[in-house]
Structures are given as C-alpha cells and as structure tokens.
Image (tube, grey):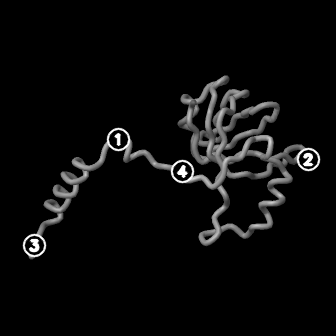
C-alpha cells in the first residue's frame, strides 16, 4: 500500500468532499420525536413527561416540533448570547428561550410565522410557574 502524507490525505479528502457535498448537505438537521401543538405545551404535559425521567444519553429528552406559530414579542438577547421571545399559536402563547442563539436576533422579527423544534421546560418567575419552550431550532415559514 502506498504511504501518504497528511497533506496529501487532506487534499484527497477535500477533493472527494467537494465532489459529493453541496450546501444543503452541510445544513444540520434537528431530529424531532413528535408534533406538539402549543395548546398541549403545558405544565400537565411536563408532569406526564417527568414520568419518563431521568433523561440522559440512553434516554434523551423528547424534542417536539410545531408549525404556524407567530412571534408576538420581539426577540431580545440575554447576557449577550441567549435569545428570548414569545410565540402564539391559536389562543395559546408561550415564551421561548434559545440558548446560545443571541446571534440569531437579527433573523427573527415580530410577526414572523415560524416552525419550531423544542423541548419543554418550566419557568418560575415572581412565584408564577409556566411552561416554556427551549428551542433547538427555528425556521421562518
């Protein structure tokens, strides 16, 4: 077998990748488990999901998707790195928190229709506990 330098291996791998990969193949895909309308994204659903715990490598937390939600509160960046905004679907609204996505603030606007991939969480603020969405990804519709 022919011995190859690291530079030659890199060149051959890059040549191969250039021939088989396109921009679409380089876009990460978020796998979801279930479509969940926002009317079901509730503390009751969270209580049911807690029966599946503990979540971890062998038992990942379910990732849900929903379509046709509307951004009803302008996104704001928290601590220079996280994004928070509110969405509504039918008469149900929920806060969304997207860890590490502060750089996406210029992509999401009040009134946008969005599809979301998310996990459910609860948030307690001023003694009031509500369900919230922890975003994994967002697509403007």
Q: Which of marks 1 and 2 is nearer the N terminus?
A: 1
Q: Name the residue under label 4.
A: 30
In space, the residues marked 1 and 4 are separated at their CA atoms by 16 Å
Q: Earlier in the sequence, mark 4 or mark 2?
A: 4
In space, the residues marked 3 and 4 are separated at their CA atoms by 39 Å
| Residue 3 on image: x %, y % | 10, 72
Q: Mark 1 points at which residue?
A: 23
Above/below status of 129 relative to 10: above
Q: Which of marks 3 and 2 is nearer the N terminus?
A: 3
Single out the residue that lies furthest toward the front.
35
In space, the residues marked 1 and 2 are separated at their CA atoms by 47 Å
Instruction: Kindly identify which numbered label has been placed on residue 110.
Output: none
Q: 75 left or right of 100? A: right
In space, the residues marked 3 and 2 are separated at their CA atoms by 67 Å
| Residue 21 on image: x %, y % | 30, 48
Q: In which quarter of the image is the C terminus?
A: top right
Single out the residue that lies furthest toward the left.
2
Q: 126 left or right of 136? A: right
Element carrying mark 2: loop
Above/below status of 32 relative to 80: below
Q: Residue at x 38, y 47 (%)?
A: 26
Neighbour class for label 4 at 10 Å: few (<14), some, many (≥20)? few
Q: Name the residue under label 3.
A: 3
| Residue 49 on image: x %, y % | 77, 60
Instruction: Kindly identify which numbered label has been placed on residue 127.
Output: 2
Which of labels 1 and 3 is toward the front? Answer: 1
Which of labels 1 and 2 is toward the front? Answer: 1
Neighbour class for label 3 at 10 Å: few (<14), some, many (≥20)? few
């Amino acid at each position: 077998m022919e011995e190859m330098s690291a530079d030659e291996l890199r060149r051959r791998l890059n040549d191969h990748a250039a021939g088989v990969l396109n921009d679409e193949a380089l876009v990460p895909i978020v796998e979801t488990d279930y479509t969940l309308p926002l009317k079901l994204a509730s503390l009751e659903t969270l209580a049911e999901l807690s029966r599946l715990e503990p979540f971890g490598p062998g038992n990942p937390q379910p990732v849900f998707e929903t379509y046709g939600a509307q951004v009803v509160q302008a996104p704001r960046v928290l601590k220079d790195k996280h994004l928070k905004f509110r969405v509504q679907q039918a008469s149900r609204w929920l806060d969304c928190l997207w860890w590490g996505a502060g750089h996406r603030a210029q992509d999401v606007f009040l009134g946008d229709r969005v599809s979301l991939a998310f996990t459910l969480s609860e948030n307690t603020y001023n003694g009031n506990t509500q369900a919230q969405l922890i975003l994994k990804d967002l697509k403007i519709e």
